[in-house]
Image (spheres, helix red, strand yellow):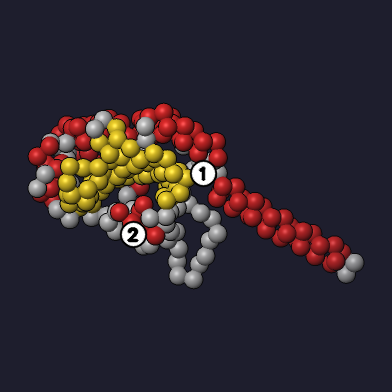
Amino acid sequence: MSELAPVAFMLVFAAIIGLIVWLVVRTVRHNRAPRDPAVREDLARLATAKGWRFSPRDDGFLRRFAGGYPFGHGARQRPALDLVTGTHRGRNFACFQYSPPRSLPSGEYSSEIDYARVVVVSLPEPVPTVVVTAARFAPRWTRRYTVGDDAFDRAFTVGTEDEPFADRVLTEPVRHWLLEHPPTGSLRLGGPDLIGWQPDTGGFEASMVEPEVDRLCDLLDRIPTDALRR
């Protein structure tokens, strides 16, 4: 039995080393995957063809946004990556990637980097905040607001501090459109922007920029113009 002890120790040691190597490789792949150089080149070409602007990195861009979801807890200090800005359908827009700070229990640390893909379309003027998220993905802190539409209230959770404004925005045509075209992430009307964001796991392509901006423009086209003016 004593002769087998060194062998068992070496097997356990090798298994531990193997696990550490696997975790390191997994973390590196996870962190690099969304930053695909080919996508960056395609975005630059798209921006040139459309008369838009492209920047691989802008360290100050996120400071233009107010705090709160999804740019709270220091996120506005993060850089905007693969940033495309321009005008589409008469509205200013931005599309970019960023890494929101991870929410971990006190004392815990993770070297993995999460990425989010964000699309922003400017509004005529600043408005109160309304956040719409699929009910199954809704943040725990989201205030439960209901519009009295059973199908919509089952599908989405709405967070707002201004219920009269939410009433004016979430009209029947808007609710119907959202049910027919559910966002893959979350939507936020607030300040001078309509913002859509979702986890970015590396599947984003330059060909998705225009359809994603169109999606937000289509939604805005269905919101009564008076609702977006104070």
Q: Position of residue 76 (x, y in %)?
A: 36, 58
The crowding category of the residue bearing disc 2, from other C-alpha atoms within 10 Å (few below 14, some 14 to 19, many at least 20), is some
The crowding category of the residue bearing disc 1, from other C-alpha atoms within 10 Å (few below 14, some 14 to 19, many at least 20), is many
Is 9 on the left or on the right of 225, as rendered? Answer: right
Is 100 on the left or on the right of 178, as rendered? Answer: right
Q: CA distance from mark 2 to mark 1?
A: 22 Å
Figure check: 132 above or below 76 = above
- Which is more toward the observer, 87 or 148? 87
The numbered disc on residue 182 is none
User: Is there CB contact under 8 Å for labels 2 and 1?
Assistant: no
Figure check: 59 above or below 53 = below
Q: Name the residue carrying label 1.
A: 34
**Which residue occupies the extreme right position in the image?**
3
> Which circle's residue, 2 or 1, is located before the other in the chain?
1
Q: Position of residue 228 (x, y in %)?
A: 14, 43
- Residue for point 31% across, 43% down: 120
- Which is more toward the observer, 202 or 10? 202
Is 51 on the left or on the right of 229, as rendered? Answer: right
- Residue for point 17% across, 46% down: 125
Q: Name the residue carrying label 2.
A: 72
Q: Secondary structure at mark 1?
A: loop
Name which residue type carries label 1.
Pro
- Where residue 106 sits, quadrant-wise, is bottom left
Q: Position of residue 197 (x, y in %)?
A: 36, 44
- Residue for point 27% across, 39% down: 92
- Residue for point 55% across, 59% down: 111
- Which is more toward the observer, 51 or 111? 51
Q: Is residue 147 visible?
A: no
Q: Secondary structure at mark 2?
A: loop
Q: Is residue 59 visible?
A: yes
